[in-house]
Amino acid sequence: MEYAGLSHEEMATLQSGGSLSIDQADRMIENVVGVYGLPLGIATNFLLNGRDYLIPMVVEEPSVVAGLSYAARLVRQGGGFQTSSDEPVMIGQMQVLDVPDPAAARLRLLAAKEELLTFANQLDPIIVRLGGGARDIQVRLMDDSPVGPMLVVHLLYDVRDAMGANAVNTAAEALSPLVESLTGGRVGLRILSNLADHRLARAQGVVPAEALALEGLTPQEGVQRLLEAYAFAAVDPYRAATHNKGIMNGIDAVVIATGNDWRAIEAGAHTYAARSGTYRPLTAWERNANGDLVGSIELPLAVGTVGGATRVHPQAQVALKILGVSGARELAQVMAAVGLAQNLAALRALAMEGIQRGHMQLHARQVAMAAGASGDMVERVAARLVEEKVVRVDRAEAILAELRAQGS
Ligand code: NAD
């Protein structure tokens, strides 16, 4: 942990297992009865815009961290990831009902844009001082709905280094009386949208064809295998769902490690994936003029380095320090690169060796533990399961009983 410059205290926080105290937990949610632990691992080999990163990941699934580190090494051989991200602009929605003349009301709202933005900018002086705040008003006219026509007003709001839900929701609520008087209607819901499509992050990376000359394949055959795996997801939503799930294996793990809201990220990612009307993969893979494999990803990533649990959870603080990011935009870029690399890891495993071989050893350990093994029995039972190629709890229980009988 020398590389990340962690103090002894920060190392202790990471390794304490349940460093969130029951008191802290009790202040975070309601009806607290305990603290739930998950493994925190570090993925390596990340080179992003010329800088090395260590990636803290909280995830319960075997092979995710190892797969990510492996894929990051492949992209490193092609020069690492290039990333970018938009200004951190969120959308606050106001639903306006019972509007007498929706088309005219829309024009009145747009004409009053400056007044609305000025009003919204009085509400969070911290964000405004940091260069954020209300940016724009958009008005969408829904001609029909199950309850008739409605206007939907979007407040675009730059939330700087926060995820931004509170600032945006506060602004949407405060603006509502003004919106009602301008439209002659009644404001229903006032809440941010998790389809944060003004706040996109992108990553791109090249894998040299030679790095894919694996398992007896030529470099070009290796590239072709991955392109075929991607093509499956590009045309079939059944496969695209699993393709994107693999991407989120990596992204969610970093989102959780840094104390961010993974439901918000999941909602945004999948809605963005379906924006064309068909559910599509979040990544794209192609062959460049040199014959190398090029991958890219783009998705909304509304994550913060302040606010929510990021500053409350002690391990999230250490995770952010390990990442060494300057703010929310850089964090989103790292997550985009993680998503792309996790996808590469999954496609490589699926298109070449099949997912189970690499997975087997780790999976066998979990099965051994589920069967009741502890200490060195975990490895001994897992080794037998892998040897027998039967990774099932009933078999693990039988092996465990056998080993215990031998021991006694
Ligand atoms: P927050 O309100 O805790 O912190 C953000 C505030 O911190 C800002 O409003 C600002 O006043 C201050 N701040 C200090 N330094 C800042 C900086 N550099 N950049 C920006 N702001 C700075 O947190 P939040 O991000 O508004 O809310 C996140 C929480 O909201 C999450 O826990 C999420 O789960 C929850 N939430 C989500 C949804 C949703 O996704 N639909 C809805 C409601 C609540």
Image: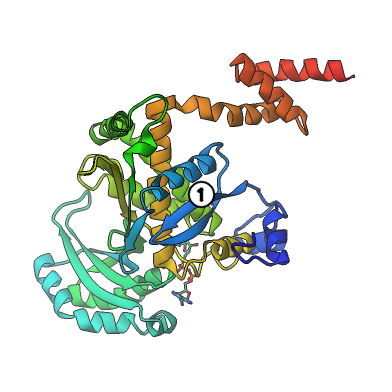
Asked whether, in this view, residue 245 is left or right of residue 179, the answer is right
The answer to whether residue 136 is above or below residue 270 is: below
Q: Nearer the viewer, residue 22 or 282?
A: 282
**Residue 288, image x, y percentages:** 22, 44
Give the residue displayed 50% in from the left and 25% down from the top: 356
The answer to whether residue 206 is above or below residue 136 is: above
Q: Nearer the viewer, residue 49 or 61?
A: 49
Give the residue displayed 33% in from the left and 63% down from the top: 85
- Hey, which quadrant is residue 320 in on the image? bottom right
Q: Give the color scheme: rainbow, by chain, secondary structure or one colour.
A: rainbow
Q: In this orientation, does residue 328 appear?
A: yes
**Residue 366, image x, y percentages:** 64, 31
Task: For the N terminus, give its image quadrant.
Answer: bottom right
- Hey, which quadrant is residue 283 in on the image? top left
User: How many numbered discs sit on the rendered protein?
Assistant: 1
Asked whether, in this view, residue 363 is left or right of residue 342, the answer is right
Give the residue displayed 69% in from the left and 67% down from the top: 7
The answer to whether residue 4 is above or below residue 359 is: below
**Residue 319, image x, y percentages:** 57, 60
**Residue 209, image x, y percentages:** 32, 38
Q: Nearer the viewer, residue 295 or 332?
A: 295
From the image, tell me which residue sits under label 1. 253
Q: Secondary structure at mark 1?
A: helix
> Of the residues shown, which amino acid type is indicated by label 1?
Ala
Q: In this orientation, does residue 20 appear?
A: no
Q: Nearer the viewer, residue 206 or 14?
A: 206
